[in-house]
Amino acid sequence: MIVSPASAAPPPRRYRATTSISLLGALVVWVALLGPLIALLVHLTPGAVVSALRQPGAWQPLEVSVLASLVALGVILLIGTPLAYLLARDRLPHPRVWEVGVILPLLTPPLVLGLLLVFMVGQATPIGAALSHLNLTASDTFFALVIAEIYEAVPYYVLGAEAAFAAVDPQLEQAAALLGDGHWRTWRRITLPLAAPGLAMTLAVTWARAMGAFGAVLIIAYHPFGLPMQIWTTLQESGLSAALPFALVLLVVALPLPIGAYVWSARARRRL
Amino acid sequence: MLVADFEVRRRQFAVNVAIQLEPGERLAVLGRSGAGKTTFLEAVAGLVELDRGEIRLGSRLLSSAGGAHDLPVGRRGVGLLRQNPGLFPHLTVQENICYPGHSRPDVAVAMANRMGLAALLGARPQGLSGGEAQRVALCRSLQSGVGLLCLDEPFSSLDRELGRELLELVRAELEAGPTAALLVSHRLEEAQAFAGRVAILDRGALLQVGDARELVLRPLSATVAALVGYRGWLRRGDQLMAIHPDRVWASGGAEQDGALSGRVVGMRPDGVRIDAELEALGEWTGRFHCHLDDPPQMGQEIRFRVDAPPIFEGQEARLD
């Protein structure tokens, strides 16, 4: 049957929200989701922040948290990046088994994760005993804090990085190989730059998770005080208003990287 | 010189190829979709492991059965151009062209200018048309100093005119140098336009290799005949016959085809003198659809009909 262009049915119109409805919706989302942040800022006076931060030792939890998160992030990058790439390219036997292993820490409540970690790396365990030969103790130490942060944050990185690598067309890697690049050179010149926007976002989320790790930290790394523990103990000992300045500090330290990464990532994606 | 004699087993059949290619020679491999053409090229390019035999380029062993001694993809001196140009989206056209490690920027840019890419050197691949992208991909793959360029129907998604133009460009670039080229295609005219020698591949087997004109005039089997343009088939008992533009041809060649044990009449649509041939057919009857591509008018279909028992169930109308 011949259908003339004039009688052809017009393409179906897709529903699209008007500008005003869209803005209103965005406002509701912003107010609802940023409500806690707005409440924090409303309840804080600059004087309270300054006096809280001027107390002796007030900066130490921040230093501990930043340092532990940097170490945790380094370890996660080293282990998680190759794992995520191999998963994305289906180069591992039994990939589902690997994936379940990665997801399990994410599905386990952080407090339970902390308890399980005590049973795994506590001083009375074989791993704990082996660590003690290296002069390491995974209980109430900086090392324990790093372990707890890694467990809480690593699934976010591996799953996010896997998605970022999977989004890179394997035919581009093949094209680079055909043009003379070896595996590492292809990875460095093609895979990494193309996955970078997704990796940046993932890294930012992982950083925020590591900085804010609390449940597992509470169980195996109460000391040394990281920032989340500082907030918790101040809340317990001195009440809500005393804990708020530290909450602000945690947000100020934890958020710029994710926001910066988001902005860069969005721009980079537009270029690709 | 490329010497390839190998087998790659696939799920439905094995791709079994023995072929030689002199430096600078161009060979077109013609076959239907799923005939094993891409597997053939991927084996030569080193993307697929061989199950038997070996592939040599010059004095170097590129691949052998089992893959233990295979040269890595990037060190074989084999380029591959596919339908997807595979341009790197984070690099400009010039950066794409100069991508191969040992490319010389001045040579690369000179070639890009020859290919009409001068104005696009600073552009990103996303803004290019299909033809421009393939031009860039072609220019890039010729920078890496390849001894053999494999073309896996790179221009089949473009319109025919543009595809022909780009094939001419490939020919022009290859003509001067020692780079040999292998083109796989499902279009006879593309294969003929690109190479003097054409190989017919069907279900992984090379049915016939030879001069392009020879293949059309003397196909060795009905499958080859169908691939080089014969349309309309008749059978009577165990007799076989095919019609050429200038004469009626009876051959035993088609008897190699198990599916066609009887005698078959095939007809090439171009230039056949229909009245004369119909008279010549005598008691041979059947049903033909002739598509006169060129001449007289492009796109005009002329049909004529003769009653006959069809040999291909349900396919008596057309085979293409």
Image: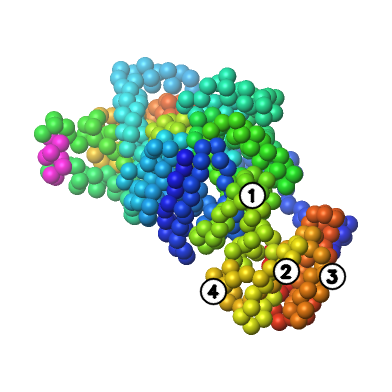
Q: Chain of mark 1?
A: B
Q: Which residue is mark 1?
A: B191
Whether residue A228 can be seen here? no
Q: Which mark is residue B258?
A: 4
In which quadrant of the rendered image does the C terminus of chain B lie? bottom right
Can you tell which of label 4 and label 2 is closer to the viewer?
2
Can you tell which of label 1 and label 3 is closer to the viewer?
3
Judge from the rendering whether residue A263 lies leftward or rightward of residue A238; answer left or right.
right
Residues marked 2 and 1, same chain: yes
Q: Amino acid at mark 4?
A: Gly
Whether residue A62 can be seen here? yes
Residue A130 on the magenta segment: yes
Say whether disc 4 or disc 2 marks the residue closer to the N-terminus: 2
Separation of marks 3 and 2 at Cα, in angstroms: 13 Å
Q: Amino acid at mark 3?
A: Asp
Separation of marks 4 and 3 at Cα, in angstroms: 32 Å
Q: Which residue is mark 2?
A: B248
Separation of marks 1 and 4 at Cα, in angstroms: 27 Å
Task: Reply above or below: A47 against B25.
Answer: above
Give residue B95's position: percent from left, percent from top: 56, 26
Stretch in magenta: A125-132
Give residue A55's position: percent from left, percent from top: 34, 18
